Amino acid sequence: AEAQLRQVQKMEAVGQLTGGIAHDFNNMLAVVVGGIDLAQRRLNGPRREVLMHLQNAMEGATRAAALTRRLLSFARSEPLLPERVDSTDLIGGMSDLLDRTLGERVKVEIDLGRETWPIYVDAHQLENAIVNLAVNARDAMDGQGLLRIATENVSLAANEVGDVRAGEYVRISVTDTGCGMPPEVLERAFEPFFTTKPVGKGTGLGLSQIFGFAHQSGGEVGIESQVGRGTTVSIYLPRTEVAASVRVHPAVQRAADAE
Ligand code: ADP
């Protein structure tokens, strides 16, 4: 009976996840269908109007495609291709991209420190992680504020952050002057599909992907946040070459334990 109860709870959890995504996806499809419908009705009207409706449909379709892409890559957990990366070079090289992505009202400050050590990570995924954090920061600042990215070398004791192993790490931290996270958000922030953003805007996959990336790279990720003041998300990546050990997300582990 207990096993059955757990099965029911699991199905409920899966239902909530897929329900939320199906909902987002449906809203995007509604934009596509609505746009095409309006364009068809206006076929004999002004050309500009027809084009505008088609453009709306295209945007809806593009967003839906982006959602399924993210879902698929999450489900597949794209394999990491670790290589020797100089974090200072990598982050220094992202400054233009970040300026363009965040808009004029967000000031970007990059502090690369004086020393640098190589890390062994998938460079593409590290870049993705930083862009994700920067976009979260922009959202939290309502499009206006200061974003600071810093790298430094730190020595961590075992479990000093999350369940990190003792050792030398490069810490990449992304700090914003945004709204901060109340405890109930902080507690769930790494959960896949947890989002406080409006339907269609957030997928709740950003931080959980970063969590997966950091752990698979032998590192950790930590959040410090104060409501009304801002948030710092820090990714810790080991300074020495470590075999990419696959550690499972706690939520996935809980589901597996329940079997
Ligand atoms: P998404 O951004 O799609 O919602 P994430 O997993 O990246 O998904 O973030 C989960 C939630 O954590 C967000 O919806 C938001 O409530 C909170 N959050 C993430 N980053 C920040 C931040 N920099 N400041 C405040 N809250 C944040």
Image (cartoon, helix red, strand yellow):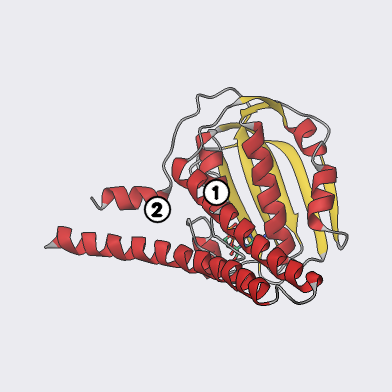
Q: Is residue 233 above or below residue 124?
A: below
Residue under the image location 57 percent in, 58 percent down: 64
Question: Given the image, on which type of amino acid does mark 2 rest?
Answer: Ala
User: Quadrant where the N terminus lies?
Assistant: bottom left
Q: Is residue 42 above or below residue 55?
A: below
In front of the other: 115 or 197 = 197
Residue under the image location 48 percent in, 69 percent down: 23
Q: Is residue 240 above or below residue 218?
A: above
Q: Is residue 257 visible?
A: yes
In front of the other: 109 or 152 = 109
Question: Given the image, on which type of amino acid does mark 1 rest?
Answer: Arg
Number of residues whose C-alpha sits closer than 10 Å to that of mark 2, classed few (under 14), some (14–19) or many (20 or more): few
Name the residue carrying label 1.
69
Q: Position of residue 164 (x, y in %)?
A: 52, 39
Task: Write down which quadrant ligand 1 falls in.
Answer: bottom right
Rounded to the nearest angstrom, the CA distance separating label 2 from label 1 is: 21 Å
Residue under the image location 32 percent in, 52 percent down: 255
Q: Is residue 235 above or below residue 226?
A: above
Q: Are marks 2 and 1 in contact (CB under 8 Å)?
A: no
Secondary structure found at label 1: helix
Q: Please tell me which of labels 2 and 1 falls first in the chain.
A: 1
Name the residue carrying label 2.
251
Q: Position of residue 14 (x, y in %)?
A: 35, 60
Number of residues whose C-alpha sits closer than 10 Å to that of mark 1, classed few (under 14), some (14–19) or many (20 or more): few
